[in-house]
Image (cartoon, rainbow, N blue to C red):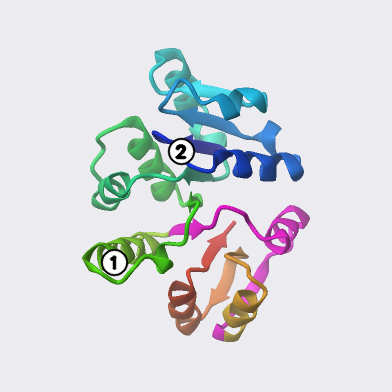
Amino acid sequence: MLFFIPKFPVGLQETLSEYELYDELDSIDFFVEDTDIEELKSFGCKIYYASDAKDVSSILNRLSTYEKLEIYDPSLDFLRDLKEGKERNIFIKIAIFFLMSGEPVIVRLPYDMDHISQGVFGRAAKDLKDDLCDMGIHFSGLKADFAELFRESAGQKLDFVSEEVINQCYERGEKLIYVSINAVVTPLAVERAKELSIGIIKS
């Protein structure tokens, strides 16, 4: 997995602890904008820097080997540029590559965008999230639910997703549903998933 960390990440320690708990740190390449993220060093992570031409080349040469991309706590400007396809930096170019390749792109946030106040900013953030979901980008909270991680690691993928399945996942606190490539996902399930901020990932 490729894991982006744009500038000034918040709550990164908890996310790294989660990956360590599930013994996933060794399978992640961390591609970072800032050169001084102490949390990554303390966990002994594989770190690649956007400011280092060799690191960028190494990441680009292996893009097709990554099964998914996670973007940690990006700014709203980053998300707007991604929505509009503005390839202003290497992070957005790579994210667009993942989207066009059909590989999962997950935005991990240390907060819930749906709980932002309903003022002008809140409406703009929710609209932006809805647009990105329409593009196939999924949103996940800071800590993933154990059930979704267990199901993914066990290779259990759903072949049929209805609105009822989405509601059941929501009741269990799951934010991601993994389905097989040829799974049938009903239109009502897609709409309900968007309403409840649940990502449907085909893999």
**Residue type for callout 1:** Asp
Q: Which residue is mark 1?
A: 127
Q: Residues within 10 Å of mark 1 (few under 14, many from 20)?
A: few
Q: Residues within 10 Å of mark 2 (few under 14, many from 20)?
A: some
Q: CA distance from mark 2 to mark 1?
A: 23 Å
Give the vertical position of 84 relative to 66 (above or below). Answer: below
**Residue type for callout 2:** Pro
Give the vertical position of 142 relative to 117 (above or below). Answer: above
Q: Secondary structure at mark 2?
A: loop
Magenta span of residues: 137-163
Instruction: Compare marks 2 and 1 and give the one earlier in the sequence.
Output: 2
Residue 155 highlighted magenta (yes or no): yes
Mark on residue 9? 2
Q: Position of residue 77 (x, y in %)?
A: 27, 46
Q: Position of residue 59 (x, y in %)?
A: 49, 26
Give the vertical position of 18 relative to 161 (above or below). Answer: above
In the image, 53: left or right of 78?
right
Give the vertical position of 171 relative to 139 (above or below). Answer: below
**Residue sitting at x 34%, y 37%:** 93
Mark on residue 74? none
Residue 80 highlighted magenta (yes or no): no
Q: How many marks?
A: 2
